[in-house]
Image (tube, grey):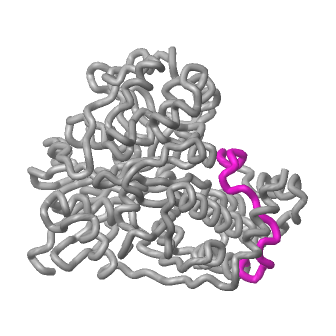
Amino acid sequence: MSTHLKAFAAVDLGASSGRVMVGRVGPDTLELAEAHRFQNRPVQVPEGLRWDILSLYAGVLDGLRAAGQVDSVGIDSWAVDYGLLDADGALLGNPVHYRDARRVGGAEKVWATVPAAELYAATGIQYAPFNTLYQVTAARATRQLDQAERLLLIPDLLTYWLTGEPGTELTNASTTQLIDPRTRDWSYDIAERLGIDLRLFAPLRRPGDPAGLLLPHVLAQTGLTGPVPVTTVGSHDTASAVAAVPATGERFAYICTGTWSLAGLELDAPVLTEASRAANFTNELGLDGTVRYLRNIMGLWLLQECLREWGRPDLGELLTAAAEVAPLRSVVDAGDAVFLAPDRMPARIADACRESGQPVPESPAEMTRCILDSLALAHRRAIGEAQSLAEHPVDVVHIVGGGTRNPLLCQLTADACGVPVLAGPAEAAALGNVLVQARAHGLVGDRASMRRLLARTQPSRRYEPRGDTAAWRAAEDRLARP
């Protein structure tokens, strides 16, 4: 391999698995290989659903050992969840999972002081029952929060354990509902009105900022030779994934697919209108002053839960069978909170179809087609409404992430949206993570340069829309009926 390449370890943590990927970057090279993959298995304990954060940290250490010598390390993960540290820097219990029932009632407590419309105008974050602000409010008066001296979001917590230096990365912090997307700083007024002491949070960091060096005991456990810097990346995995969208212009939409579908636009400024709030769009921060204007959709979680209940049948065979099922026979609202919790997913989808007077899917193939049609319809609605609310038309939709491996979903999304879909790369979050590290080390230039490198080096597949969108409009109308 050419000696001019540098190696970067991307720690990429998802809701069901984590992995350490090694990216090698040079002037016209971007290579990615998996060093280690490990499970992320939340644990139900008497007090609720918790992340097994120590197991995740052990997986990170194992992955860095497998990665070999690297020039830098960066960490991204899901958003909103956090760990609490005491005055000595010790963790106060396993972090609460965003699907835990503790979140119930947090939003109403916040809105009693700051009405939802005012909160959106100040922070631009869509309503989701598990937003960090609501979680912290729901945890008020608990012993853990009373004892806490520091709150660290999940990737920041792991970075702290690797380096001993606390920080709060901005793209992830923007999902807490405590950041002003216009100033890209804390929303001091909102925090004061809600009685939240912002000193609980470590200083803000931005993608590309240094986050410290691997501690001596970490070097000993991983076999790495120091100094090895940790570089702040877009630590919200969606921020890293959007950074890896291989767009060649500005008239594009993206869908970051996996357990969730995040569908939207990359903008220069937030959209804070009441119409935007009513449509439940969020203004999360991205690289270089950009805004990720998007809607959260339940995503492939619906299919993942069904596959688990069915005993994990062969997905390729299931998709082939689903492609033969009559299109748009039954659809559900993929953003409905009724699908948020685990277990009994096929039964809950069947109930939703029954209650709306639609045929109930009877076979796994019919259920799979219902899910994928519903996701494509949700993608259509989100991208169409985003264009209207932001006055930002698009000519193409980029799908990145795990959903690129689902050709039926990609084709249905092209059909529903009525514009071409470019699918790839699948490992977008890890690639975006690597590229931000490489940029901090002087190997690539601005976002446009990053995207040109992605387009030259990463495979993609194009899906042209079939037919017109009349059937999708009819399905949309059917779903909108009370």
Viewer-side residue, 43 vs 121? 121
**Where is 57 relative to 119, above or below?**
below
Residue under the point 74% across and 69% down = 473
Q: Taking 131 as reference, is 59 left or right?
A: left
Residue 286, magenta (yes or no):
no
Main SS of the magenta part reads loop
| Residue 303: percent from left, percent from top | 65, 62
| Residue 422: percent from left, percent from top | 48, 78
Is residue 160 in view from this perspective? Answer: yes
Q: Quadrant of the N terminus?
A: bottom left
Residue under the point 13% across and 42% down = 216
Residue under the point 31% across and 22% down = 199
Residue 331, magenta (yes or no):
yes
Q: Which residue is farthest right?
A: 357
- Residue 130: image quadrant is top right
**Where is 38 relative to 57, above or below?**
below
Q: How many marks?
A: 0
| Residue 49: percent from left, percent from top | 57, 36
Q: Taking 94 as reference, is 340 left or right?
A: right
What span is in magenta? 322-342
Residue under the point 31% across and 26% down = 90
- Residue 274: image quadrant is top right
- Residue 383: image quadrant is bottom right
Q: Taking 104 as reference, is 394 left or right?
A: left
